[in-house]
């Protein structure tokens, strides 16, 4: 088989065994280009015939095509092109476009120096416009345009990397060439101005910025993007970071608060005053700071204590991601979940970058040591592309990120040997020990009689705060002398000193029942209640003890932390204790039994929540489901690993029937996996799991697969619950696909079930509204509202939303009232999707009712909410409505920009019903005022603007309008 290399990044090139092979001009090159444009996928004979001959067909097109293919095979190799049931495809050969894309993907997760090298290699592959003379051919145009967009992005990314590595002069050249061809690429303008400034050409930088603003205003009637508008002030004030210190997402002009609830910091913070000040200063000066040290040394507590000072010092929102319970492969999703994002599984890091570029955070990543291979690339990518983001991590080892500043944290200071009692008592380790003993025994004091024993205890605990707390809990009940005697004897059986030995020592002091319960507690993924503990052990045939008293003793021994929350008394295992208990459980041979009990308890919990969903206050049941979602994730992972698919199906069925509750990314993906795995075993006991997987797949956007799973679930279902979920999945997939008739068919089937009359009729009302069948829409909405209260608060909020959409067609005031009620109720019960669609509908109503003063603040809220959850489909719908608002205000260029951005976005839903004509009229009006040429240029600018920047521009425009109102 010859070595075949194919080039499409320029005129078509073929190299066979390293030698250039000329492919004759004409039909052979046209057919080969068409095959390459389909990227290894089959191409029908008709498509190849059209590529080769167009409308001038030969007498026998199939025979003529076979002749062309035969000649091509003589150049490429006999087996290079194969014919299958779906058509012809290339089977061999390396394509330069694939290499280009691979280099870009690799560069995305590397530091600036390494990324710059790969981006330079990627750009060097280009010899001219992609696909050369066939760039405008119908078969090649979409891929050629996509590759050209990637090339322009790569030029900007390369220039950004050069800025970060202190090469502003080199960055200027590539950006000048790009802007000569694409003068309205705003990020390129921003990078060029920044590069000129750092190259010592400040006057020229300011002039380029002012020239761009003038051209943009004169030719297109637009203002620069917010980041670009702020750049002039930073140049004049000389506040740009040095070229070698920039992050590539440093919008040379980038630029909700409240501390996250995290660790319990109610106990005294002792002996870390200097370290606290040093940490705050380090984070203020550096983009990536990592607190390192052994387990139990107090890394997490130090960071938790620093949050208040950090917020005052660096400003902006702070998020904390606890990575200790996160398994391999889940780091990025965990960070996204902490931020409240709902990204696609395939683009989590990109979605993080997009959000954090617009809304910079201080990201706190706690306990990174077991995920360093994931956390390092994530931190590199985020900090390189989001210059205003800071990362503060805790880990036993450094992250391995080029820009990180390591802050080592050692044990607390030990008392000096031979010093006086007063001096020894002032040592941080002794002060912490004494404080923790007094919390349990207030009369405890350091005296001449016990000082030597306390000093020795602190020494044997190596000054580790967690070890000192464990020893203190025993001292409160047994006295220092007894604890010291037992500690010394027990530590002799382990490696001397260190936290692991102290945890093992503390555990050995427990009664067998308490030790057994401690092992069991390691299966909890998050904090837990005493009721949860009793629920798990109730599924253990081997358990016969008193879980409540055993848990109380574990708290007394400081092996389990206890705190109060809004939901009552909660408990959690300290991380080092969790590791110890999990290892002990595995060594006992009982791990599978305990994990099965935990999964069975989770099934009980979510089944109970599902039963209460329609009869208990919606806010309460949503809070209960959200609180146990981490346990659901853990239970499903175990059930899938153990092939307990019926149990997994029961769990996902219960969660799926909690209508209008949105699961996090990890849980949603597990629910889809349950559905896919259930499809392989196919039976009534997994039908509900397959149906729920179908619904989640549709919500993720894979509508074809959702339909397949839904049909399969329907075929294997033998109970009304599974059938209903499958029908809803099929209805939603059809609706998202634009097939309103099929969607209505399935929703009618759903509404035939008595308990789902409200849900079914709500959706039928919306579908009728989309078809402008207002009589049917009113009938369905009336049924939905009547059924809503008995169906639960979430469903009633959804019914109010649909009724608002219907009423707004004829009674704007009543429609707005219903939509506002729906949004408020959805917020109260945490029905995210209902809240968003209600507010978007209300925004449209306010715009069309000429109520801009009410519309603008609502639009700003929607921009922030939709950005946070990554609901880009709804963003484009919102921006179309914003274009209407701007048209009413005579801001023709801004209106054209947002309408053009929505028109070009691949994820934008097509207008339906009356919206088709509405937006055609808006565009015609814009063309009349701007002229077709200017409108076309604005649409090109909008299509090439990253979606996050489009949304930032929308926020600025809405803010401007609100300030002028």
Image: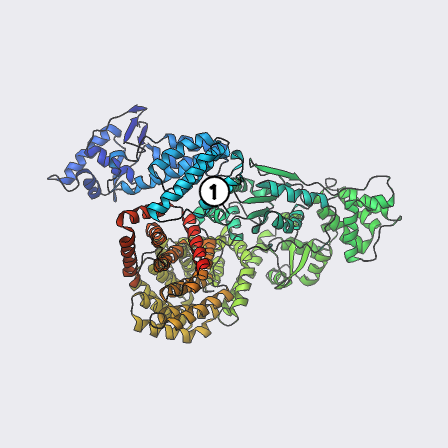
Extreme-left residue of the structure: 59
In the depicted structure, whether residue 201 falls above or below residue 863: above
* Image quadrant in which the C terminus is located: bottom left
Q: Position of residue 315 (x, y in %)?
A: 58, 49
From the viewer's perspective, tell me whether residue 508 is left or right of residue 782: right
Report whether residue 913 is seen.
Answer: no
Report whether residue 391 is seen.
Answer: yes
* Image quadrant in which the N terminus is located: top left
Front residue (pair 870, 850): 850
The residue wearing badge 1 is 232
Front residue (pair 692, 895): 895
* Colour treatment of the image: rainbow
Front residue (pair 936, 362): 936
Q: Residues within 10 Å of mark 1 (few under 14, many from 20)?
A: many
Front residue (pair 823, 718): 823
Q: Position of residue 635 (x, y in %)?
A: 53, 55
Q: Position of residue 655 (x, y in %)?
A: 48, 62
Extreme-right residue of the structure: 448
Q: How many discs appear?
A: 1
From the viewer's perspective, tell me whether residue 177 is left or right of residue 600: left
At x 54%, y 54%, the residue is 634
- Callout 1: helix, strand or loop? helix
From the viewer's perspective, tell me whether residue 363 is left or right of residue 157: right
Q: Position of residue 137 (x, y in %)?
A: 24, 40
Q: Quadrant of residue 777?
A: bottom left
């Amino acid at each position: 088989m010859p070595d075949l290399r194919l080039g499409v990044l320029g005129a078509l090139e073929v190299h066979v065994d390293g030698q250039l092979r000329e492919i004759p001009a004409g039909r052979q090159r046209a057919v080969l280009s068409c095959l390459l444009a389909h990227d290894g996928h089959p191409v029908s004979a008709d498509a190849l015939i059209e590529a080769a001959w167009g409308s001038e067909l030969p007498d026998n097109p199939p025979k003529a095509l076979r002749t062309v293919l035969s000649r091509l095979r003589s150049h490429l190799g006999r087996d290079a092109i194969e014919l299958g049931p779906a058509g012809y495809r290339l089977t061999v050969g390396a394509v330069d476009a694939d290499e280009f894309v691979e280099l870009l993907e690799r560069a995305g997760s590397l530091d600036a120096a390494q990324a710059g090298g790969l981006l330079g290699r990627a750009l060097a592959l280009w010899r001219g416009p992609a696909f050369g003379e066939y760039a405008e051919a119908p078969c090649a145009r979409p891929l050629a345009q996509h590759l050209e967009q990637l090339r322009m992005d790569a030029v900007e990314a390369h220039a950004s990397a050069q800025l970060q590595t202190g090469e502003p002069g080199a960055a200027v050249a590539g950006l000048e060439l790009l802007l000569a061809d694409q003068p309205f690429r705003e990020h390129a303008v921003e990078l060029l101005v920044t590069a000129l400034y750092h190259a010592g050409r400040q006057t020229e930088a300011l002039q380029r910025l002012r020239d761009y603003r003038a051209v943009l205003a004169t030719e297109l009637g637009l203002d620069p993007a917010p980041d670009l508008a702020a750049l002039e002030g930073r140049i004049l004030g000389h506040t740009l970071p040095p070229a070698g210190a920039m992050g590539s997402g440093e919008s040379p002009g980038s630029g909700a608060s409240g501390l996250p609830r995290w660790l319990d910091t109610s106990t005294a913070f002792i002996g870390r005053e200097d370290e606290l000040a040093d940490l705050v200063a380090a984070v203020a000066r550096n983009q990536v700071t990592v607190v390192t040290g052994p387990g139990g040394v107090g890394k997490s507590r130090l960071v938790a204590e620093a949050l208040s000072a950090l917020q005052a010092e660096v400003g902006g929102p702070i998020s904390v991601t606890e990575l200790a319970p996160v398994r391999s492969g889940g780091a990025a999703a965990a960070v996204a979940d902490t931020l409240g994002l709902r990204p696609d599984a395939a683009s989590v890091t990109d979605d993080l970058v997009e959000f954090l570029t617009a809304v910079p955070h201080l990201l706190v990543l706690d306990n990174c040591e077991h995920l360093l291979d994931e956390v390092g690339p994530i931190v590199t990518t985020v900090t390189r592309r989001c210059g205003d983001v800071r990362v503060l991590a805790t880990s036993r080892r450094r992250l391995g990120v080029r820009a990180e500043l390591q802050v080592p944290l050692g044990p607390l200071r030990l008392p000096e040997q031979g010093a006086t009692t007063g001096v020894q008592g002032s040592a941080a380790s002794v002060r912490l020990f004494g404080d923790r003993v007094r919390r349990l025994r207030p009369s405890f004091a350091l005296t001449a009689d016990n000082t030597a024993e306390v000093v020795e205890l602190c020494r044997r605990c190596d000054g580790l705060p967690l070890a000192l707390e464990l020893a203190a809990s025993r001292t409160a009940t047994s006295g220092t002398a007894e604890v010291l005697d037992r500690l010394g004897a027990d530590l002799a059986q382990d490696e001397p000193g260190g936290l692991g030995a102290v945890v093992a020592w503390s555990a050995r002091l427990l009664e067998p029942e308490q030790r057994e319960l401690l092992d069991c507690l390691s299966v909890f993924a998050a904090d837990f209640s005493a009721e949860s503990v009793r629920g798990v052990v109730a599924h253990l045939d081997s358990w016969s003890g008193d879980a409540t008293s055993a848990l109380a003793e574990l708290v007394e021994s400081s092996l389990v932390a206890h705190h109060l929350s809004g939901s009552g008394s909660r408990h959690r295992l300290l991380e080092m204790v969790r590791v110890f208990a999990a290892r002990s459980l595995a060594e006992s041979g009982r791990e599978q039994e305990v994990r099965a009990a935990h999964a069975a308890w989770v099934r009980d919990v979510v089944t109970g929540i599902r039963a209460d969903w329609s009869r208990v206050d919606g806010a309460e049941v949503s809070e209960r489901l959200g609180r146990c979602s981490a346990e659901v994730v853990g239970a499903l992972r175990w059930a899938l690993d153990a092939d307990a698919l019926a149990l997994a199906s029961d769990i996902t069925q219960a969660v799926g029937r909690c209508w209008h509750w949105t699961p996090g990314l990890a849980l949603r993906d597990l629910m889809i996996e349950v559905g896919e795995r259930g499809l392989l075993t196919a039976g009534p006991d997994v039908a509900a799991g397959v149906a729920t997987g179908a619904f989640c797949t549709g919500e993720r956007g894979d509508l074809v697969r959702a339909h397949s799973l839904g049909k399969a679930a329907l075929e294997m279902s033998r109970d009304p619950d599974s059938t209903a979920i499958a029908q809803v999945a099929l209805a939603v997939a059809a609706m998202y696909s634009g097939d309103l008739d099929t969607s209505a068919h399935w929703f009618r089937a759903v509404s035939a079930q008595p308990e789902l009359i409200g849900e079914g009729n709500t959706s039928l009302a919306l579908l009728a509204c989309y078809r402008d069948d207002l009589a049917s829409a009113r009938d369905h909405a009336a049924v939905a509202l009547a059924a809503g209260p008995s169906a639960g608060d979430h469903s009633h909020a959804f019914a109010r939303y649909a009724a608002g959409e219907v009423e707004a067609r004829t009674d704007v005031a009543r429609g707005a009232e219903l939509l506002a009620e729906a949004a408020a109720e959805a917020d109260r019960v945490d029905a995210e999707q209902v809240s968003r669609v209600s507010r978007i509908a209300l925004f449209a109503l306010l715009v069309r009712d000429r109520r801009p003063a009410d519309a603008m603040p609502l639009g700003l809220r929607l921009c922030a909410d939709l950005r946070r959850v990554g609901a880009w489909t709804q963003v484009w719908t919102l921006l179309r409505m914003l274009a209407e608002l701007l048209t009413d205000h005579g801001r023709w260029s801004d209106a054209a920009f947002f309408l053009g951005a929505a028109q070009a976005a691949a994820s934008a839903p097509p207008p339906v019903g009356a919206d088709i004509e509405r937006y055609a009229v808006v565009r015609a009006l814009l063309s009349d005022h701007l002229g077709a040429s200017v409108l076309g240029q604005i649409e090109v600018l909008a299509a090439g603007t990253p979606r996050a920047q489009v949304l930032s521009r929308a926020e600025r425009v809405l803010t401007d309008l609100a300030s002028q109102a």
